[in-house]
Amino acid sequence: MAKDKKKEPEQTPETQEQKAEASQPEEAEKKECPPEETELQKLQKEFEEHKQQHLRVLAEYDNFRKRTANEKSAIYNNAVSDTVKELLPIADNIERALGQENASAEDMKKGVEMIEHQIQACFEKLGLTEMGKVGEAFDPNLHNAVAHIEDESLGENVIAAVYQKGYKLGDRVVRHAMVQVAN
């Protein structure tokens, strides 16, 4: 029976060293790979963090843009609503005046004058101011000269006549005054 069994080669100290040397490069490779892999994992993790941060910034910007657009729209709608609210009583008075069947010319004139005063009060309340009065100096930023006359009694570049009043809202010109300029 002893002959049937194959003898395993005896392991001498030299064969043990050869096996150890052969396994050392594999172990060295294993030891070198983990630092590269960990560096790669760190970079991937950092990339993912930056990616998430970027996506959050994009989402915040999109929300900001939408919120700003909504606020602009709301401000505009509020301004228009407030203006219309101030003009509605004037429109009501004009409608009442036109509904009068047996009014004399004097009464109609008085009613129109009252409506004009109401309009002026509304403009004041809204901050709208008139510009372009006779005798003022001509300013091309505020006035639109449509005619020119020679008049010795008036100075140089002075408004001689106003064909259409101009209006300003604060420093912004809403409508230029249409004027005639002297000299």
Image (cartoon, helix red, strand yellow):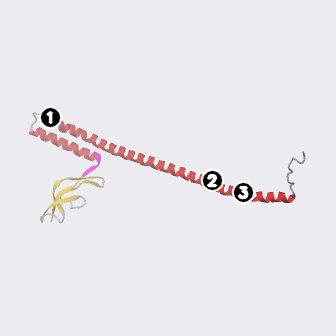
Q: For the point 33% across and 43% down, which residue is it? A: 77
Residue type of the residue flagged with mark 2: Gln
Residue 25 at x, y = what percent? 74, 59
Residue bounds of the magenta highlight: 125-129
Mark 3 = which residue?
31
Q: How many marks on residues?
A: 3
Given residues 70 and 165, the one toward you in this image is 70
Q: For the point 77% across and 59% down, which residue is it? A: 22
Q: Quadrant of the N terminus?
A: top right
How far apart, in angstroms, are the residues tagged by discs 2 and 1?
85 Å
Residue 141 at x, y = what percent? 25, 60
User: Which corner quadrant of the image does residue 83 belong to?
Assistant: top left
Q: Tell me, yes or no, if residue 132 can be seen here.
A: no
| Front disc: 2 or 1 | 2
Q: Residues within 10 Å of mark 3 (few under 14, many from 20)?
A: few
Given residues 25 and 84, the one toward you in this image is 25
Mark 2 = which residue?
41
- Is 138 situated left or right of 30 in this image? left
SS label for mark 2: helix
Mark 1 = which residue?
99
CB within 8 Å, label 3 to label 2: no
User: Which corner quadrant of the image does residue 146 belong to?
Assistant: bottom left
Q: For the point 14% across and 40% down, which residue is it? A: 110
